[in-house]
Amino acid sequence: MLQIMRINAISGVAWIATIFCALQVGCVTHARGRWCPPNMAAPDPSAAPRSGCFGVMPCAATLELIEPGNAVPIPTSQPGVEPADLPPRLPSGEGFWRNPNLNVGPQRLPAVEPQPPSPLPGGQQWAEPIMPQPRPIPAGPTRSGPVAEIEIPDPPKEDQLLLAESYYAMAVDADKRVEERAMSLYLDAIIGAWDYLESAPAEDDISMKTGRAWVIYHSSLARLIHIAAATKRFERNIRIKIPETYGFRVLEIEYAGFAWRADEFDEWNVVGEYHSKYLLHHYKRNGLGVPLVIVRNRRPDDQFLPVRTPFNATAVLRPLDVEVRDDCADPAPNPETHVERLVGTLQLFNPDEFDDVDFRDCQTKLAADWTALFAYMLSHPQPELQRASHHGLAEPEPAGLFMLEPHQPGRIPIVFVHGLLSAPYTWAAMANELYAFPELHKRYEIWAFQYPTDEPFLESAAVLRRQLDGAVHCSDPKGTDPALDNMVVVGHSMGGLIAKLLAADSGNTLWQHAAFVPIEEVVAPKDIRIRLQQSFFFSAMPYVKEVVYIATPHEGSSWARRCLGQATSMVIEGIEHRETKHREVVNANPAAFREELRRRPPTSIDLLEPDSMILKGIYQLDVAPGVSEHSIIGRGWWSIHDGASDGVVPVKSARLPGVESEVMVTATHTHLNKHPGAICEVMRILKEHADQLPWVQPHLVGQCAQD
């Protein structure tokens, strides 16, 4: 009984210690971002649908009522209110906005007549609903004579905007009532707004009406895509079928600049409101289109790709010309048939490859939101990473290298290696900053290594070496891409030690710090001998040219020997099959191993103790010639025992002789790799490394197919 109580007490203390350490080191046990649906643009009250009893039906578009999902946040244009996505208002007080990027001239706004007080509750106004003016078509053959050609002038552009307002108001109302016709009404609103924008005269300033037309266009497109994705209206990702009375209206889908095929666009998420304290800045570009985050699910034959791969896209819907739409229309549809009418093209652009798109025979900026990708990652953790962060101590997850997208020739891989009790998401802030700078983003691509804490990091380093070999061979079988021979490895905390093990030759140094006899004299099963050989004997990887250490304990950390570290280590070591094999090998070789290996299977925390012989052996290793080392050290903490430190790793332990650069940052251990000072230093290293290499324009591995 006393033995059971003792075990339970130790287990309880260990798990409390584990939770505390997880909070200190930043493990990902929950979503670290907030991905919320935004408010849709409210329809114009004068264009609201008519009620049979009380006149105009109020149709406020709120988040709770219409449930816009992940719709794009587009503010409402109102007199005296400056939308965030439009240029600043002119100081002269005129009724238009100045936009140097668009070639549209100023247009003054008509005076608004004040409305008399309303006798209705809530101040509602009696009004006739705004109905679209019918567009006559050429008369067909009749019994009385040949075809009668009738010339009908196009409606004024003001009527096109009123038409778009009416359709948008009806669409929001139908959307609120969860009616299927909402998609068709949103499409009509898009067409009306697009026709208005195309017919507007060239101006240097955006009028209030033009700004409102853009609001209707983007808000309707965001909601249309969201509903189409939710109701599975995408047909093999090559077109969208929108139901109407006698059939379907069809939007063809075109893709430009992606490394993925059309059938790999598995989930469509319209960018909405999001927030994460782990992202320092929000990088976006205003322009034409609706930003999206597309998710690709892993295929059975995929290598080095996560279960869910998100990437950025921007959607632009281009309706067909009015004449073409009229030619496609059936003036007298047969109720017994279903007609499919092509009405436009939905274009998806990769915002990393395209800065501008065509509009009205000129170039205009393409909208983009680069931070949304990382906000989505933080708010939707990968299933395997969530399991690893919750159970990585007691239920080991396999180590793995993964890419955010297939390797693009000419782009240099940055290999991020996280620290103890952490996950690759700890690099989101740094990756967000990297994506925001085109001169770096076009030169680099992100790879990340996930490994379980229960394994000794010597074994994790061996896994990473094998997987890097496989990734390079898979990405460049002929060995013609020089970018793969110039990798940069960035390691945080214990990840820095793994990074060093990629760039150094072990020789016999590590084994001599672990055993007294040559490895050939060790009696062990074949699988154990292979693991020992791979962990203690290796050569520097020829691909690695730069290593960046962030808060790396080269000489250990006193936290590893304190009660919290020991308690966590006891939880990690409690894997029965490993202990059984370890005892068998030790019993078969009673005088072969040093005490560090003899007493129990060493954990990663054991290897971080300052008196660890294996850690001292790693410290003595020198990186291969031609490899540059850089240190980023935290000094946001001070204690009597350790002096200056980041709260976990003392400054004296993080310093390494012979590095090319060393930077001190006032930050704690958990936040050092997210600190602006550390991020700026990493970006400086990346820029200098890229400037030393000739740049070859990368080309896409695959083009999106439409069949």
Image: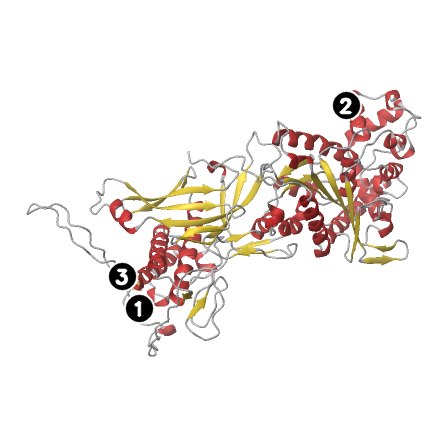
Amino acid type shown at disc 2? Asp
- 331 versus 274 height, above or below: above
Q: Secondary structure at mark 1?
A: loop
Which mark is first along the chain, 1 or 3? 1
**Horizontal placement of 132 versus 10: left or right?**
left
The quadrant the C terminus occupies is top left
> Where's residue 288, x and y in %?
45, 54
* Rendered residue at 69%/46% (across/down): 686
Which mark is first along the chain, 2 or 3? 3
Q: Residues within 10 Å of mark 3 (few under 14, many from 20)?
A: few
Residue at mark 2 to residue at mark 1: CA–CA distance: 81 Å
Q: Say which residue label 2 marks.
A: 527
The quadrant the N terminus occupies is top right
Whether residue 233 appears in this view of the structure is no
**Horizontal placement of 343 versus 42: left or right?**
left
Residue nearest the observer in this picture, 658 or 37: 658
Amino acid type shown at disc 3? Met
Q: Nearer the viewer, mark 2 or mark 1?
A: 2
Q: Say which residue label 1 marks.
A: 54
Q: Say which residue label 3 marks.
A: 131
Q: Nearer the viewer, mark 3 or mark 1?
A: 3
> Where's residue 475, x and y in %?
61, 32
